[in-house]
Image: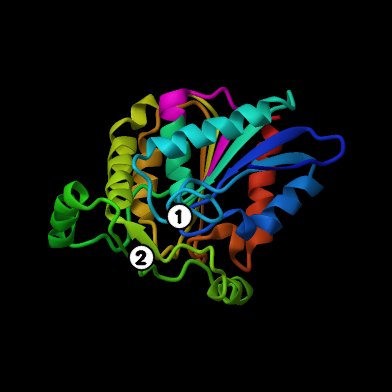
Amino acid sequence: MWVWECEKAKGVFVLVHGANEYHVRYQWLIQKLIDEGYHVVMGDLPGQGRNPVSQGHVDSFQEYIDTIEQWYERAKQFQLPIFLLGHSMGGLAVIQTMLQKKLPVRAVILSSPCLGLVDPPSKLKRYSANILNKVTPKLRLPTNLAAVTRCEEMIKRDETDQFIVKKVSVRWYNELTKAMANSNKEVGNFPDIPLLVLQGGSDLIVDKKAVSQWFNQLQITNKYYKEFPELYHEVFNEPEKETVFHVAKQFAELHL
């Protein structure tokens, strides 16, 4: 876990990264938040980045939930309004955390939350994964992800980053699938906390229809959905990221 502080802070952001990435890829966003007067708390999720836990593997999705709660507890020490921002699988983990822990944060921001996949494995692969999950749960298979951003600078930096996860375990995939199913099933139990969903309209990873369907079923007072038509999966890493950040900043300021 890392903590970045600013002078005269008005709030704290807890950032939760997605799969196959880690905190270093959020340097731009972290600095923007600091410049706007927010402390930032962030770490590497289990099995990702520089976390010592087995790379690309978790025994249970609960590991993510417990980790996010630890980051939240650290943010509480500042005694300021807390915002949870989760991207992709991190967004799914934030949803699961809020369903289970009901953390009293000021608001939640989800960036392309993983509630469905554009290109899910075939039925045969899913069947095989269920069997392998019982026999050899730590077996790792290539992710073979599509493009996540149009930003050439980010694409180049990722090519030589040894901490980018290239393979994930069978158990990890099964846990991801269960978390997606549970999030859709329990959507009516999401706590009544202000929510902003930022979605790339040209997302090649997350199924934006699944995201909008989940959003439309939410039974909460304040919810906002913003889709950026041309943007890929990582909206905070796209060439238009300043526009995306402005939307997130305005939302946070409304709920300070």
Quadrant assignment for the N terminus: top right
The residues bearing labels 2 and 1 have C-alpha atoms spaced at a distance of 10 Å
Element type where label 1 sits in the image = loop
Is residue 99 inside the magenta stretch?
A: yes
> How many numbered discs?
2
* Type of amino acid under label 2: Thr
Q: Where is residue 224 in the image (x, y as percent from the top left)?
A: 52, 40
Residue 75: quarter of image: top right
Going by the picture, which residue comes out furthest to the right?
7
Query: In the picture shown, does residue 139 fall above or below 77?
Result: below
256, 119: nearer the viewer: 119
Circles 2 and 1: CB atoms closer than 8 Å: yes
Question: What residue would you read off at disc 2?
Answer: 143
Q: Earlier in the sequence, mark 2 or mark 1?
A: 1
Identify the residue at horizontal 64%, vertical 48% (top origin).
247
Residue drawn at (78%, 32%), measured in percent from left and top? 10
Look at mark 1 in the image and give the residue it sits on.
19
- What secondary structure is found at the residue carrying circle 2? loop
Q: Where is residue 41 in the image (x, y as percent from the top left)?
A: 66, 40
Q: Give the range drawn in magenta.
A: 98-110
The residue closer to the viewer here, 217 or 129, is: 129
Q: Is residue 249 magenta?
A: no
Q: Which of 146 and 218 is in front in this view?
A: 146
Q: In this view, does 79 lie to the left or right of 86?
A: right
Q: Position of residue 204 (x, y in %)?
A: 40, 65
The reply to whether residue 66 is in sight is yes
